[in-house]
Image (cartoon, coloured by chain):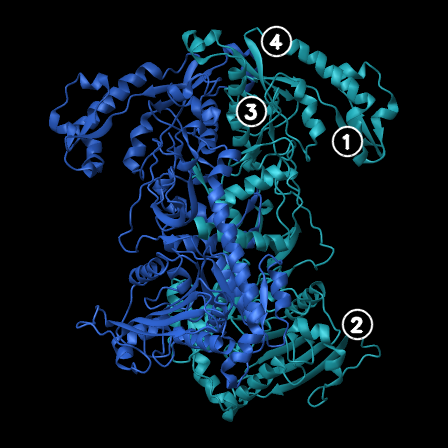
Chain colours: A blue, B cyan
Amino acid sequence: MSLPTTLFAGILPRNSVRRFISTHSRPTLPSIEYPLSHPIYTIWAANTSLGKTLVSAGLSTSFLSSPHRKFLYLKPVQTGFPEDSDSRFVYNKYSEFFSQNRPEFSVFASNHVLKASVSASEAVSVGGFEIERDKDMSCGNGVVNLGLYEESKLQGSEMKGFSKLVCKTMYGWKEALSPHLVAERENARVEDAELLGMLKGCLGSESESEKGEILCVIETAGGVASPGPSGSLQCDLYRPFRFPAILVGDGRLGGISGTISAYESLTLRGYDVVAVIFEDHGLVNEGPLSSYLRRRVPVLVLPPIPKEMSNNLMEWFQEALSTFHSLEEIMQSNFLERTSRLRNMPRKAHDIFWWPFTQHKLVPEENVTVIDSRCGENFAVHKVNNNVDLITQQFDACASWWTQGPDATLQIELARDMGYATARYGHVMFPENVYEPALECAELLLEGVGKGWASRVYFSDNGSTAIEIALKMALRKFLFDHKIVSDDLVAKNAESRVDLKVLALRGSYHGDTLGAMEAQAPSPYTGFYQQPWYKGRGHFLDPPTVAMRDGVWKLSLPQEIETLKPSLEDLTFSLRENIFKESRDTSNLADIYHSYIWKTLQLIIDSSGSTRTGALIIEPGKTLTYAQVSFWSFLPLHLFLLAHDSCFT
Amino acid sequence: MSLPTTLFAGILPRNSVRRFISTHSRPTLPSIEYPLSHPIYTIWAANTSLGKTLVSAGLSTSFLSSPHRKFLYLKPVQTGFPEDSDSRFVYNKYSEFFSQNRPEFSVFASNHVLKASVSASEAVSVGGFEIERDKDMSCGNGVVNLGLYEESKLQGSEMKGFSKLVCKTMYGWKEALSPHLVAERENARVEDAELLGMLKGCLGSESESEKGEILCVIETAGGVASPGPSGSLQCDLYRPFRFPAILVGDGRLGGISGTISAYESLTLRGYDVVAVIFEDHGLVNEGPLSSYLRRRVPVLVLPPIPKEMSNNLMEWFQEALSTFHSLEEIMQSNFLERTSRLRNMPRKAHDIFWWPFTQHKLVPEENVTVIDSRCGENFAVHKVNNNVDLITQQFDACASWWTQGPDATLQIELARDMGYATARYGHVMFPENVYEPALECAELLLEGVGKGWASRVYFSDNGSTAIEIALKMALRKFLFDHKIVSDDLVAKNAESRVDLKVLALRGSYHGDTLGAMEAQAPSPYTGFYQQPWYKGRGHFLDPPTVAMRDGVWKLSLPQEIETLKPSLEDLTFSLRENIFKESRDTSNLADIYHSYIWKTLQLIIDSSGSTRTGALIIEPGKTLTYAQVSFWSFLPLHLFLLAHDSCFT
């Protein structure tokens, strides 16, 4: 008898449908949570020195042109510090701009430096800063708490209210190199979790108890994929927050390419880029860029930045003000659209979706989970608490019902691989063709989960359909092996045809297409209302089950075996792993179960009657062992084994 | 009675299974064909001025270190010409390198300029060039045939054979700006089709009747996504050939980001990047780059390029030679692996695939199509002609059996969107959740194909499963509407249960899951060997059919109508479109067909017996009109309409 030969690749359902979402924080990264009460944007650039900080400063001049507002500027990672300080630049430029324009309100402006490497802290000139030195400034890893700040009250021409400018450098390093290099050289590495934790803290504390409007920008360092202090690429580092992005492009020769590529790197990480802005170099780069973006993302052009910084750029800021107003308007309207969309999503979903496996009346609108994105094992979800919108985190404990999502790193790699495969092949039909991804996937399956028993792969598009295909194949092979020839059958009428059955486990679940349900034992799910054509075309064996009771794992056996009174120590286990040990395949209990099956099968497997058992269905929960496969090999059946998604580990 | 309310989104099968692949050339782009007898690589860069041409020249020094070889260097697009000429640079540098090293063989070296803008051609100093001026040099569009070349025989220290260096500039423009700009300014635009046609010509002519080894590199202009002369981004322009890529990265500050982004732009267009190489700037950029590439793509570092070009860079080329040898080795081994893999693919596919809808014995190995990639409506396929491997083009006339692939531009956009969605969401379960792509897709469907009749969307994962879901829903709704209560039925035995049938068209096809096949009239495909559980749970109506005979479109009617002798002019059409005109919904023939259906249904639709018609299935081949939907509304059924993929136009 030939051993099983086919591996079905498909995402197959688990035997039990489980789902629960619970709030749970990841051990490493802080729980992601931020308010949606005001816009928060990340400023990215296609390369270094393209003017991210000018854009940040420009946005402050635009936003703080009215009272009752707060502009929050965060620079998480600053190298070349203290000589270079982008937060100080924004603070200074806004202050100068204010003095020149003297609006009818006042502004409280401040600039803070929270932490720095020891080397950078030692180089701090106490110049304009007020120092708040703790007794013990060290916070480990060569980083010290600085708590430096400078502040000023900018007096307006009249007294029509106040606004605020808050600039913060989170971490400073001394050398003017890439953060991953200086963190290493200055022996002051900052882990992603720490950095994100502080960012979250800054965003939270600065938005509390504020009455007026707030605009917040977070300025990255270098290019979109420049490494952060831990070595993680910044586009990966900040991904859990997935703040909408402003991309500062490159207006120089070659800049179209760099800008498009940077845009694609952000897109390939699930960011929404709401605007592209760059300095004019007279090359009309906005033409090809707008055309590439199909005019769905606005492209703004800033006036050329004077080479000699005479006039402290004040003329330039004045000239660029209308462009910054446009940018701010885009940011504001995108924010409002996003928030309103998120708020309306549960109602819309209720109105136009039909969810599978769901009685809609049992799902009130407030129970609908609005998933804004996913990162690692967490969903970023939208909630409204006390009428305040926020993005918060929920642990994905559902394994998406049947399939576990990838971890954060793999998710990005998967996105790249999917993009690559789509770009290379588009859509290609399969029969009589061969192409790399299909072949490579088949090879991997046969060398992996299929090793030793599978020799071919049939691709299906979901678990239920895979079962249908397997049933068709198995039944046809049975008819062929047993020389039940088609012509004989066609001659007879339908009633006298051979009735082909499937050997399966009671309580098992193989999917919800009408055919797959026939291989499932009768249950509430196979009732007339659920499947009016259901006959139950199977012989269903009783499996042993396992459950934890009073802190002990206990096996329950089918009634027929129970009467054989197996010894209690064979039935109880302190560790769950012990139940699934391969050595139990030859245990006393295995013999008992073997002979129970054997006896039951004697009654079922009939080689002459009009009812015949034509297929066996097993859906392994874990990787199959060869022993498990060969256990069934005494059956006069051609075996078709279904590879469960959890086999691919 | 309520009108139909649900739209099923899924890729649904066409009524007839059609497939044919024929050779066919696109009207615009030239048919893609190139030999796989030797490696052809494209040299890309993360930005301008990163040393692509140094890498090309370096490869010539490495490859032409033995006799019986030919190095072909192609520069399709050269701006700043004739002052800048990368092909001349390669020609000169190799010649100098040869003179310094004097190997034991000779080299015939030549440099050619094929075409140029009128402005560039006027600026050519006839210096080293031999001029072959045609009487009429113009080839339209402000581009002239130049046919300039310079050549020399480099004499080796001994006479152990010959090698060849052939450098070609395909098109030159005068200004040193981006190709799309200079093409416009010099009024000398070159369309993609023309450029690719010439590239194909150069590759073909230079590989003919050569005995020894050949290595060919094609050097792009600027960065990976810099526009070409037509405005198409170069990464899109060269995509039909999909030559494997060498990426010249950026070793400077910010260069990690630019290199990664450029790599991702190439990947997002289906290119295989086989190596990354860049100039050392002392920043150890290779560390993060290798880590990002997971060491799957080698990263090579070139020695710093001297600022002052004394010594004509000869010391630098000498120092870099071992790195160029490594690069060449990577290129050679990748080429051999690729070719060998392509050659073995039909056999492997035969061994380990099970294709759907295929009798494997009828597909000899030589009939298996090896699809290397797809671009627009064409496959790039691998063939072996007279024992020579080549990549050639086949038109995808199969519409991938059931779904038409996207065009070249949309294919890339689709890849980006898929990458984005995957990166943003990974894998997320659906019930009780809502997220943007699902909601947006549902909205688009309801505002598009579902407008006026559909109010909800149920997502399925393939056409067959969509049919299964629709059947379940329709039958359940019927039972509910007709107060056939579940409990009554459970009480009775299975035999006395109501037998629910589906109203369908004879000859229609709804998929191959066991349940979907029940809604299909008996045919060879529903035989006992194909579907041993098949009962045929339908009432099947005879539809009119249409065919062209003797140059005229003729309708054939079901026999019962035929006897009513409809007039001949109602049955013949000169244009196919006329058959599907909406006005025919109220024609004489429509009335006849309407009453035929009505009569047939009188016999079928029985409101009391144990056989009941619980569902109607229609799979429209084109977009549904509201009239077509309402035509069926007299039936006491809840309608579930299935949106065909071709509806989404």
Looking at the rendered structure, the secondary structure element under dot 4 is loop
Label 2 to label 3: alpha-carbon separation: 61 Å
- The 10 Å Cα crowd at callout 2, few under 14, some 14 to 19, many 20 or more, is few
Q: Are marks 1 and 3 on the same chain?
A: yes
Tell me the residue at 28%/55% (across/down).
A28
| Sequence-wise first label, 3 or 4 | 3
Please report, as a chain letter, where disc 3 is located.
B
Depicted A52 relative to depicted B155: above or below = above
Q: Which residue is mark 3?
A: B517
Label 1 to label 2: alpha-carbon separation: 50 Å
- Would residue A309 be found to the left or right of residue B593 on screen? left
Looking at the rendered image, the disc whose residue lies closer to the viewer, 2 or 4, is 4
Label 3 to label 4: alpha-carbon separation: 24 Å
Tell me the residue at 39%/23% (across/down).
A520
Q: Which residue is mark 4?
A: B606
Please identify the quarter of the rendering in which residue A621 is found: top left
| Sequence-wise first label, 2 or 3 | 2
Amino acid under disc 4: Asp
Numbered label attached to residue B139: 2
Q: Which residue is mark 1?
A: B582
Q: Are marks 2 and 4 on the same chain?
A: yes
Amino acid under disc 3: Met
- The 10 Å Cα crowd at callout 4, few under 14, some 14 to 19, many 20 or more, is few
Numbered label attached to residue B197: none
Please report, as a chain letter, where disc 4 is located.
B
Please report, as a chain letter, where disc 2 is located.
B
Q: Position of residue B34 (x, y in %)?
A: 63, 62
| Sequence-wise first label, 1 or 2 | 2
